[in-house]
Amino acid sequence: MSTMVDNCPDKKCARDRILAAAEELFYREGIRAVGIDTVIEKAGVAKMSLYRAFPSKDELVAAFLADLDRRYWLWWDEVTGRHPGDPRAQLLAVFQALAKFTRGTSYRGCAFINTAVEFHDPAHPGHAVAEAHKREVRRRLRRLAAAAGAPHPEVLADQLQLLMEGAYSAGNTMGQDSPAGAVVGAATVLIEHHLSQGNVS
């Protein structure tokens, strides 16, 4: 455990350590496979500390995903921010980063997809966070597609999101030998096709 974490206020320490432990365990092993006692042991906190921060496992799952969602959008903004004022390049940058991520040695699939599969009831707190995340991906893709000049940004965004979901799945199933790296080329073809339609007089 880092010095920074060890020296933070006790309440914040416990919550942060629990979230870090939950993220590692849930992502690697699956949420249903990991019991609360395992999270407590990994985090090195008392059971009461966990239940003060998260009254139920469902709330812990939702908090884990909400924190992941927050960091995902920081990642997205950092990737797209490398190409200010160029939405076409921003779209491609997202897919280039996605291809690299899905072929990493520690990749175990998309945590949001994994959670939605484990908890298919839309009313489950974890499923709700996962669904909201995917809807925000769709909204952001539509915004970039529109800014790039696509005549039908909603269509391009939906097609690009399907590519993303396929890359997430292929990377999880086939590992580093997966065709996930081809997602950049596929996205490029789609984007160029749609943008060329917008240039036809």
Image (tube, helix red, strand yellow):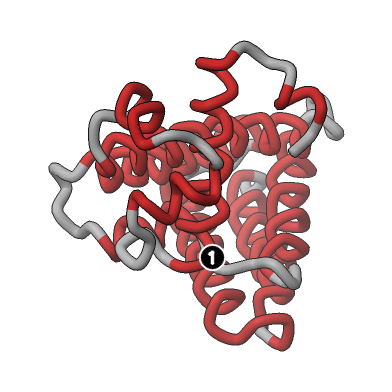
Q: Is residue 144 visible?
A: no
Label 1: few (<14), some (14–19) or many (≥20) C-alpha neighbours in 10 Å: some
- Quadrant (top left, top right, bottom left, bottom right) of the N terminus: top right
Q: Residue furthest front?
A: 46
- For residue 157, side relative to residue 49 (left or right): right
- For residue 72, side relative to residue 130 (left or right): right
Q: Position of residue 61 (x, y in %)?
A: 35, 43
Picture residue at 44% right of the left edge, 45% below the top: 40
Above or below — where is 147 with respect to 151?
Answer: above
Q: Position of residue 141 (x, y in %)?
A: 54, 41
Picture residue at 48% right of the left edge, 41% below the top: 137
Mark 1 is on which residue type?
A: Arg
Foreground of the two, 25 or 117 = 25
Picture residue at 73% right of the left edge, 74% below the top: 181
Foreground of the two, 18 or 189 = 18
Mark 1 — residue?
28
Above or below — where is 141 with respect to 178?
Answer: above
**Label 1: element kind:** helix
